[in-house]
Image: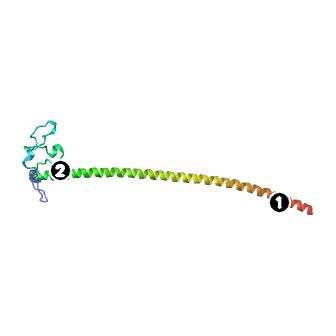
């Protein structure tokens, strides 16, 4: 059943898995060579030599994280790229942190500015209300004086009419 061809003529499951395993094996062997199977030589005390290829005096990049003692050129290139990527990542994180701080400071400044403007407008509104109340009282006083003066004028007119008659 597994070996039977698919209807569209594609590879069987066994052929597909075999190709993937073969490709992976070629990649691993070409990058690490025979050192792939010699990792466990050396002592495992303190971590030194735990993942060290046979015959090498210094631990490999996998044990120390450094790139000076890599066993072959492909590993040193990978190690350098990894170190550079980590450095770039740290720089990006630092820039992001600075950006967050700047954004928070800008938000605080904006909030402080808005609070100051709101306070100014409230004080202006309060002053305008007080002014309006004073003007209203003044207007009422003028209306009372006018009404009083009008009554007095009417009384004088009536008094003048009664004297004329």
- Mark 2 closeness class: few <14, some 14–19, many ≥20 residues within 10 Å: some
Q: For mark 1, does the 10 Å Cα neighbourhood hold few (<14), some (14 to 19), or many (20 or more) residues?
A: few
Mark 1 and mark 2 lie on one chain; the one further toward the N terminus is 2
Protein image colouring: rainbow
Q: Give 156 or 96, whichever is nearer the viewer.
A: 96
Residue found at x 79% / y 56%: 148
Above or below for 97 versus 7: above
- Residue 113 in sight: yes
Above or below, comparing residue 39 to residue 31 in the picture: above
Q: Position of residue 27 (x, y in %)?
A: 11, 53
Residue under label 2, please give it: 79
Q: Is residue 117 left or right of residue 161?
A: left
Q: Which residue is mark 1?
A: 153
x, y percent for residue 59: 13, 43
Q: Are marks 1 and 2 in contact (CB under 8 Å)?
A: no
| Whether residue 13 is visible | no
- Residue at the limit of the structure toward the top, as seen here: 45
The dot on residue 119 is: none
Give SS at disc 2.
helix
Please tell me which residue lies in front, 14 or 123: 123
Q: How many marks?
A: 2
Q: Relative to 142, is 45 above or below?
A: above
Find residue 119 and report its horizontal and vertical position in percent: 54, 51
Give the SS element for disc 1: helix
Quote the CA–CA distance across marks 1 and 2. 108 Å
Q: Position of residue 132 (x, y in %)?
A: 65, 55
- Which residue shows up at 31% across the image and 50% down it? 94
In the rendered image, the residue lying farthest to the bottom is: 164
| Residue at the image position 25 percent from the left and 51 percent from the top | 87
Residue sitting at 33 percent across and 51 percent down?
96
């Amino acid at each position: 059943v597994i070996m039977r061809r698919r209807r569209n003529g594609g590879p069987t499951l066994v052929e597909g898995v075999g190709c993937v395993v073969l490709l992976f094996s070629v990649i691993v062997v070409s990058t690490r060579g025979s050192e792939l199977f010699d990792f466990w030589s050396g002592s495992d005390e303190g971590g030194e030599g735990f993942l060290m290829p046979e015959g090498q005096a210094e631990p490999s990049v996998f044990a120390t994280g450094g790139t000076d003692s890599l066993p072959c050129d492909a590993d040193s290139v990978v190690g350098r790229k990894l170190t550079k990527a980590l450095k770039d990542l740290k720089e990006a994180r630092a820039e992001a942190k600075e950006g967050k701080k700047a954004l928070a400071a800008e938000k605080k400044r904006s909030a402080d500015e808005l609070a100051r403007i709101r306070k100014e407008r409230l004080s202006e509104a309060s002053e305008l209300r007080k002014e309006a109340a004073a003007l209203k009282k003044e207007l009422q006083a003028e209306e009372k004086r006018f009404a009083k003066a009008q009554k007095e004028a009417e009384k004088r007119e009536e008094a003048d009419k009664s004297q004329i008659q």
